[in-house]
Image (cartoon, rainbow, N blue to C red):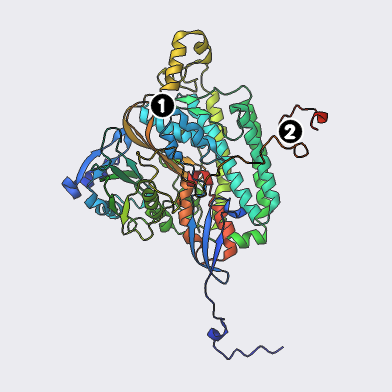
Amino acid sequence: MEPVDLDFEEADLELPSEPMTLLMGPSHPAMHGTIRMILKLDGETVQDVDIQPGYLHRAFEKMSERGTWSQVFPYTDRLNYVSPLLNNVGYALAVEKLLGVEVPRKGQLFRVILGEMSRISDHLTCNGAMAMELGAFTPFLWYLKAREWIWEACEEQTGARLTHSFFRIGGAAFPPTEKIQSQIRSILPRLLEVVTEGESLLLKNRIFLDRTQGVGILTKEHALSMGVSGPVLRSCGIDYDVRKDKPYLTYGECDFDVPVGEDGDTFDRFMVRAEEIRQSCRIIEQSLDLMKKIAPGSPEDAVSIVDPRIVLPPKEKVYTTIEGTIAHFKLIMEGIDVPPGEVYGYTEAGNGELGFLLVSRGGGNPWRVRVRGPCFFSLQAAHDMIRGGMLADIIPTFGSINMIGGECDR
Amino acid sequence: MSKLILERLKAQFGADVLEVSSFRGDDVALVKPARWVDVARFVHDDPRCACTYFVDLSAVDLCDPRFQDLDMDDRFEVYVIAYSVEHKHRVRIKTRVSGDEPRLASVIPVWSGANWMEREVFDMYGVHFEGHPDQRRILTYDEFKGHPLRKDYPANRAQPLVEYREGTFNKLGPFLQDEGMPLNRSAAPDERN
């Protein structure tokens, strides 16, 4: 067949078009029901986008100012609700920084172990959901199966599956249960197997690769000035991880790597998260070993500090002694007397740097609790990942930044 | 460790840096609002500081409405936190603006990530950022009145977009005899009719 003679100018071929405005969300399954995007489309190309968060704003910061310091914990569970224990840890550490206390070694290791479990559940959810949004349903189901094991372990320890409210200022609500250590140890190999299995379905899949590689690119410089953190920042090639750069708890003693991407595209973000799951497993195993080495009965062998001004007395004392009753009453009714001051405590949560700016003016209530929710920053940077791309690429890009409504809108 | 930034700030800006502190290891500098952007730019550009990573920007309401005047000077404390990936140090720069028509210059030219944070401060505290390209509310809606994180805003005030309905709902239980299930689960099937 003879080729068609292309004698005319290409510009004549284009039909005159004016940009179309499309409202995407908040009731769109890929927008998690909490984000609205106003898209300016030229055909299928996104010319401009206005991202509007705020549909899940529940006044976290205002409510925190009304109660005592301890009453903020249930609210932090509902920030990033796929890794609530990490938020508990972040807030507890920030208040402890303001108080100037440190929990005993066993309590620190315990926080690391449960926190990393939460991180795994966070990454499994994100990677699984992202694959599902691209039509790969099986990895999602497998990852959720693995997440179920984590939640079962959390339920064994904390009594709750999702909103644990487990850690306290100055320690944890309970010491480790008898079963928990062996349960976690038995989960890890099975979990790694599931992660590898899920990847084996995706990483040789042409559709998945084509739809994620080279899509939603974020450059290094832009990521830095946008304040992006966590896996999204590391996928751009910057090895910033709070656990490494400013080790807190016992992270300094653990041997683990910080996976870093190259291109900053959706695929790299997927791979960074997948690798972080493996590194978290390494951290958990090492921490469990370190926990074994603690001599029973030593001061290190406790999850909470001993300070009646901060930690609630044990229940037996509350019910049998007058001192216990009064200490309990004072802590519950008046709250912990945090000295005046202002600190910024930050930890590495599932999505990146979770910061709490706490201002105290003395007395039992916080004056100001500011949460630096990492995905609020990632979502802001999503503007540049989406613009100029195709409409259909919004779905994997948006899925890969792991926008969690509770943490983003607070 | 990172006292270096505070020393450099003091050397560069002299009396415009009102106060420095390192409480619990956080390096904090309080500066005059007039030099807000200059200080930010210095921290970002100076090769010894090189704080190119934007961490956070928010505000604190320092006014206690029980004892203080709402229009007091220095009512809102706006702060920005920046980090240097290269030198691994971070600094918090603060400034204070008046409670009466609070205004401050925008730091978006320095860190583009300040865009949404300044919108949030405007939304929550009503601080206007001069030079901000898109000063809209972000977490609440355009029709919202007042600024919720101000200390004089009552926490239990509701501003529904759709008016609350008056009266009772006619479809709440107990249902009529022939519709729905009884609210009492223990009711035996034959008792329902």
Q: In the figure, residue B136 lies in which quadrant?
A: bottom left
Amino acid marked by disc 1 = Glu
> Where residue A315 sits in the image (x, y, percent)?
53, 15
Q: Residue at x 55, y 55 (%)?
A: A398
Q: Residue at x 37, y 53 (%)?
A: B114
Residue at the top extreme, as displayed: A321
Amino acid marked by disc 2 = Pro
Residue A162 can be seen in this image: yes
> Where residue A194 sits in the image (x, y, percent)?
67, 43
Distance of label 1 from label 2 (alpha carbons): 54 Å
Q: Nearer the viewer, residue A399 or A211?
A: A399
Q: Residues within 10 Å of mark 1 (few under 14, many from 20)?
A: some
Q: Nearer the viewer, residue A269 or A333?
A: A333
Residue at the front extreme, as displayed: B167
- SS at badge 1: loop
Q: Nearer the viewer, residue A4 or A361?
A: A361
Q: Nearer the viewer, residue A109 or B184?
A: B184
Tell me the residue that label 1 is attached to. Answer: A102
> Where residue A10 sits in the image (x, y, percent)?
55, 85
Tell us which disc is closer to us: 1 or 2. 2
Q: Residues within 10 Å of mark 2 (few under 14, many from 20)?
A: some
User: Position of B38 compared to A55: left or right?
Assistant: left
Give the position of the N terminus of chain A as an image quadrant.
bottom right
The dot on residue B182 is 2
Q: Chain of mark 1?
A: A
Q: Chain of mark 2?
A: B
User: Position of A110 compared to B44: left or right?
Assistant: right
Residue A193 can be seen in this image: no
Q: Are marks 1 and 2 on the same chain?
A: no
- SS at badge 2: loop
